[in-house]
Image: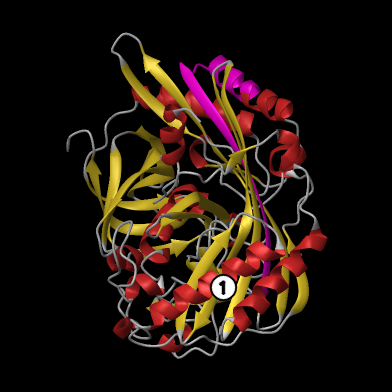
Amino acid sequence: MKRRDFIALGGLGAAGALVPGWFGRAVAAEVLATPLDAAMKKPLADAGLQAARDAGASYCDVRIGRYLRQYVMTREDKVENVVNGESIGAGIRVIVDGAWGFAATNTLTTLAVADAARQAAAIARANARLQVEPVRLAPAPALGEVDWRTPVVRNGMEVPVEEKVELLLGVNAAAMGAGASFVSSRMFVINEQKYFASTDGSYIDQDVHRIWVPFTVTAIDKASGKFRTRDGLSAPMGMGYEYLDGDRSQRFELPGGVVAYGRSYDMREDAVAAARQAQEKLRAPSVQPGKYDLVVDPSNLFLTIHENVGHPLELDRVLGYEANYAGTSFATLDKRGSYRWGSDIVTLFADKTRPGSLGAVGYDDEGVPTRRWDLVRDGILVDYQATRDQAHILGKAGSDGCCYADSWSSVQFQRMPNVSLAPGKAPLTVAQMIAGVERGLYVHGRGSYSIDQQRYNSQFGGQLFYEIRNGEITGMVEDAAYQIRTPEFWNACSAICDERDFRLGGSFFDGKGQPGQVSAVSHGSATTRFDGINIINTARSL
């Protein structure tokens, strides 16, 4: 991978970091469409489980993983890079004398897996000498042999690279034809083949697919040298290639001439719109700073949910166990059940089951079935996100099913599930919401952001800002960002559109931990109104 491509790739994720080696070894494209031999998995897992028992483990889980990644990178009429990566091996986690131990191997033989299990047990026994409190593992069901698969119509790994290149170059040409000065487009296709087995009696086979097609269009005013960009407004999805060549039944025509998408995406149409809107941004006046009512599209609000709800309600951050990537959390345990997080209409929920979402799987990496639960209900903080060894801290009988690793070679730990804002209960369209705003801004797309170490103070930009005057959109403005304090922002929520407008956004490369790991997570909402939010002019503040 070229250094320039790696840097560009690493900058794409919300709170993300791309760890070296994430792509694994380079392979031919044909390898990505060849499945792992299913018959080999259980004997390998059983060898690890038995070796761990023999070494004195009271608990063991074995994860056999094959992680396939492909990305295609283009610019204007050129292909800049194509990367096919495969990473395959087994990770073994054990408890010995009340302490965790972990080891991994990329040699998939019964002898190698058993050796790794014994090594994990030795590490756990050494850790036990220093532990303050033994691991308390919440029960998990003995599931026997089960499987779960992303319901794909067309496996993205089986689509020829030539077809992907043709799509991206066609998108670039369409944007250039609509007035773009430059355009770059990318495609990420992910397939995680994960097999989990534990001494609890579960053997879980999962096949997980994800896809993302980001692009950036640039328009330049040659006379002044001024330039503006507009990124794609699509969401990464837990789907197959049908996301790009399926029907257009979930196409949303929104005020301001913006088009949004649900479970299918017309990349060419969005790129043409991006070229025209980037040119419009060149002519748009700079925003006047002050207090505005915000009408926030899901393509922007997802990132605020991610940073100001999802991360601060990760229990390891709350407890101070995790402080990498913007710190711990202001949402301490004493706030549970009483803290006013938002207005009465604000319900924020975790959900690992929603079809098409990035986080949709049947079971987490501890063998726990995934589910949906409320984090904030009717404005009150009611819960957090817990794994098997955290559940007792909250008085829960079981895990929330949110423990994951980004590779067979990484130890699983607490990761954010899909976190979403529940849609409004009363019928309300975006146009009706805008009609009720006297002085406001209508916001689309994720932009730059910053956040403090407690997830309390933050600032968010966007791709498109439209000024609203007396219930009507009067035109585009530029250089805007909103500054918020988390509880004040959510308490300023005065209206949420109904279920018809509910859409997903998401982070394809969400970073956490040390050493860093990445994961993919979606955040859904309908268009939402927030009253009296402080808007700064980013050009004047430089």
Which residue type does callout 1 highlight?
Arg
**In the picture, residue 314 is in which quadrant?**
bottom left
Q: Residues within 10 Å of mark 1 (few under 14, many from 20)?
A: many
Residue 454: x %, y % from top left: 26, 65
Is 419 rendered above or below residue 480?
below
The front one of 203 and 236 is 203
The front one of 305 and 80 is 80
Residue 443: x %, y % from top left: 41, 45
Residue visible at 41% across and 34% down in the picture: 7
Residue with the most extreme right position: 39
Relative side of 515 to 454, left or right: right
Residue visible at 64% across and 69% down in the picture: 114
Residue 118: x %, y % from top left: 56, 73
Relative side of 409 to 488, left or right: right
Q: Quadrant of the C terminus?
A: top left
Q: Secondary structure at mark 1?
A: helix
Query: Magenta stretch containing residue 179, yes or no?
Result: yes
Magenta stretch bounds: 169-197
Is 246 rendered above or below residue 394?
above
Residue 307: x %, y % from top left: 38, 58
The residue pinned by badge 1 equals: 118
The front one of 99 and 156 is 99
